Image: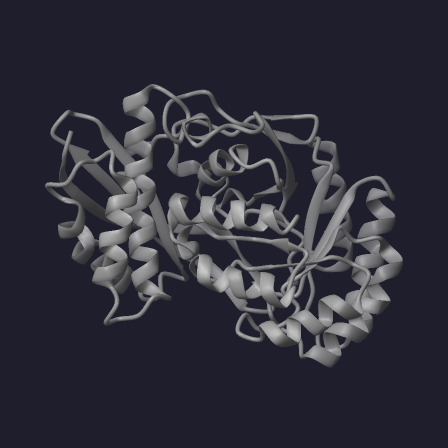
Amino acid sequence: MKVSAVETQPVVVQLDQPIGSALGQIAKFGCILVTVRTDGGVTGENLIFTLNDRRTAVLRQMVDELADVAVGQDAGHVAGFWARAWKDINFLGHKGVPVAGISAIDGALWDVLGKTAGLPLYRVLGGAQDRVPAYHSGGLWLSRSVDELVEEAQGFVAQGFRAMKMRLGLPNSADDIARVKAVRDAIGPDVKLMADANQGLTEAQAIRLGRRLEAFGLTWFEEPLPAWDLDGLARVAAALDTPIASGETEYTRYGFRRMLELRSADILMPDLQRVGGVSEFMRVGHMAESHDIAVSSHLFPETSLQVLGALSNATFLEYMPWFSRLYNEALEFRDGAALVPERPGWGFTFNRDYIAHLSR
């Protein structure tokens, strides 16, 4: 069965209300919906996106330009596609938009493979667990007041979540501490709490703040430093008792290999869009396992769930429901864990009727 076409469709997904983090305000997303068609009639789907619909056309063009690396080739030879695409982007570089383009097609090809086999991807990839602990990441933003944080955190607990993440990064670190304390007091000691600085601190600030945060028993302190400062991040990780989570802005196995060499993080967080798709997520996951390091996911809960289900060192699924309305199927949760669907491929398919009404 060969790939007959790679199609892209840009859509804009609006948030119900803007949200704020140390990265700035987010109001909408430019999504590229990718469909791989085969001469056997099986189709695979995937998506990638941009914040605030910025540079979406560039991202789409990259996917379209890589289509010729896949069309006419065996749809089941996903590793062959990846190797050809990796060589093809050499002149442009092996980070950024070129890798996101590879990720988009790679994920759609894996969806084809799962559907062809009649198996969910986590089983195709080896299978490790049929449920993954999930943390709610769709709230507790920097733009929320303390009262709003408390109400939202208690709401997540009422929904059955046993873990959640809040954002840090206010000019006065004392305000960050007060917000963390308020949330911890609201949810009690048994619900896991993560805190994300969204790369907004210096090394000294991260160590000072991190030491003060240790009183609240955080599950992890996420991305305290800019993504490029792996050496500084390693020093922060060494200085703190709280585990450091990072890697959502890292590219391919080579970036994560350096993180492991430096011991920059205690939990690696590959992002399906930036790491290089399913193929590279699995390589990073197994490499982390060889160092006894856990992995979590970044965004894309519907698709990340399948790769986490294939890794025995997967620890948490990030539940961020930004794109959930794009799918026909809904995530299922039980006792604070997301259930890996047994449907073929991703187990999630695009809701074309809903998508047809989105603006572009």
Q: Answer left or right for 97 relative to 313.
A: left
Determine which quarter of the picture holds residue 80.
top left
Q: Residue at x 34, y 45 (%)?
A: 47
Q: Position of residue 329 (x, y in %)?
A: 43, 26
Number of marks in the rendered image: 0
Q: Position of residue 100 (x, y in %)?
A: 34, 57
Q: Is residue 33 visible?
A: no
Q: Is residue 165 left or right of residue 87?
A: right
Residue 136's image quarter? Answer: top right
Q: In this rendering, is residue 120 above or below 56?
A: above
On the question of residue 19 being in view, the answer is yes
What residue is shown at x 62% (from left), y 75% (from top)?
A: 231
Does residue 10 lie above or below 169 as drawn?
Answer: above
Q: Residue furthest front?
A: 290
Quarter the N terminus occupies: top left
Q: Position of residue 292 (x, y in %)?
A: 66, 48
Left or right of 131, for residue 92: left
**Residue found at x 69% / y 65%:** 168
**Residue in the picture at 41% in, 28% down:** 124
* Depth order, front residue of 239/155: 239
Q: Where's residue 314, x and y in %?
A: 60, 40
**Colour mode?**
one colour
Figure check: 325 above or below 65: above
